[in-house]
Image (cartoon, rainbow, N blue to C red):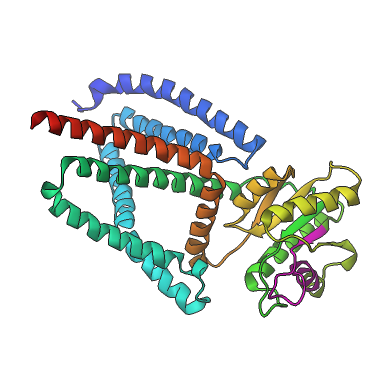
Amino acid sequence: MNSLEPYVNVLQKISVYWGLATLIMLGIFLFLWLREPRRLINGITFSIFFFSFLAELAVLIFSTGNLPFVVVMGTLFLLIIGLIFITMISMWLLLLWNAFIVWKRESHTLSNMLTLLLGIFLVVLWFANIFLSAHAKFLPDWLDVLISGLPIVGAYLILCSYNFLVNVLLYQFFPKQYKANYLIVLGAGLINGDTVSRLLGNRIDAAIKFANKQIKKGRPTPKIVFSGGQGNDEKLSEAQAMANYAIEHGWDKDQIILEDQSKNTLQNMQFSKKIIQDDYGSNKAYIKFFSNNYHIFRAGLYARMAGLAANGVGAPTRFYFLPNALIREFVAILIMNKKRHIIMISIIGFFVLLSMLVTLYVDFKTK
C-alpha cells in the first residue's frame, strides 16, 4: 500500500479550497496592480498570492499519491532552497566581486561603490556575530537582550528590500498600451558636460523605439518631452543634449518639447506635467515616461506624487551595474517613506527595550 494513500482524499479536498483562496488572492493582486502599479502594497499582495500558490502546488503534488513523483519534486524543491541558501550566505562575496567589476569599468564615485560598502559591512557583521557568540556568556543578560533586537531590525529591512525588488520586477511587466500622446524622457548627467551617456542614450532609444512601434500600429505620432535642467558642471541643459541626440538618430525636431528647468525626478514630473497640459489644452493626455529599468518604479512613485497619470517604460541597463543601482534606488525609496520606517523600527525598539527592562527587573529580584 502506498504510504500516501490514507492522506490523498484529505489533501485533494484541501487542494480545492486552497486553490479557490489562491485564485481570490490572485484576483486581489491583479485588481490593485492594474488599477495602480505605483504602490508598494502590490509587492505584498503578489507575495501573498505567490507563496499561497507554492503551497497549493505542494498540496497538489502530494495529493497525486505518486510516491516517486513526490520524491522527485521534493528533491527539486530542496535543491532550489539549497541554492537560495548558498547564494544568501555567499552574498558578501558576490557583492565584493561585483564591486571589483564596477571599479574596473565605471568611475569611482560613492554611488558606484555601494556594493563594496555593503559587502564590507556584511563581512564586519559576520565577524562581529562570531565574536559576540563566543563571548555571549560574559555579557550581562540585559545587554544580550538589547543586542538581540538588531537582527529583528535587520529582518525588517530585508523584508522591505524584498518587497522593493518584487515591485521593481512587477513594474517591468506592466502593459505598455501604444496610444500615448506624449513621452517623457527623464534626464541624467552628461559626460564632459555636453555628451549623452550610454545610460541616458538607452532611455532616448527606448522612447524612440516605443514611438515608432506606436506609429506602425497606425496611431498618431507622440511628442517627446525631454526633461532635465542644466547642472553646475554642464555646458547645456540635459533636455537640449537629449534633443540633439534624438534628432541625430532620426527623430523629427518638430515632435520635440524641452523641459529644461528641473533638477530632480520629482521636478521632472511636475514641470513636464504643466508643459504637457499647456500644449495639449487639458489634463486628459495619455502619457508614458522613460528611464532605465531599475529607476522606473521610483520614478513612478514621484509621478504619482506629482499627480501625473503616467506609467514608465524601462530602458535596458548593463547587468553588472544593476546591483549598485538597485541599492541606491532602495535607499532612496526607504528615505521617501522614512516616517513609516521610523515608526516600525521604533515599535521594534520599544518591545526590545521593554524586554530589557523586564530582564533587569528579574535579575534585580533574583539577587
Q: Quadrant of residue 184?
A: bottom right
Report if residue 235 lies within the magenta region.
yes
Percent of width and height locating residue 263: 70, 61
Q: Residue at x 48, y 23 (%)?
A: 20
Percent of width and height locating residue 206: 70, 62
Give 140 or 73, whichever is nearer the viewer.
Answer: 140
In the figure, is residue 288 to the left or right of 221? left
Residue 95 higher or lower than 283, as above or below: below
Residue 21 appears in view: yes
Residue 155 higher or lower than 131, as above or below: above
- Farthest left residue in view: 367
Region of the chain picked out in magenta, as a range:
224-244
Q: Residue at x 23, y 40 (%)?
A: 145
Which image quarter holds the C terminus?
A: top left
Residue 49 higher or lower than 281, as above or below: above
Q: Residue at x 41, y 40 (%)?
A: 345
Report if residue 151 lies within the magenta region.
no
Percent of width and height locating residue 326: 51, 58
Q: Quadrant of residue 1?
A: top left
Q: Residue at x 45, y 44 (%)?
A: 160
Give 183 or 362, whichever is nearer the viewer.
Answer: 362
Percent of width and height locating residue 281: 91, 46
Give 357 or 101, whichever is nearer the viewer.
Answer: 357
In the figure, is residue 348 to the left or right of 131? right
In the figure, is residue 93 to the left or right of 208? left
Question: How many marks can you see?
Answer: 0
Residue 187 higher or lower than 35, as above or below: below
Residue 54 appears in view: no
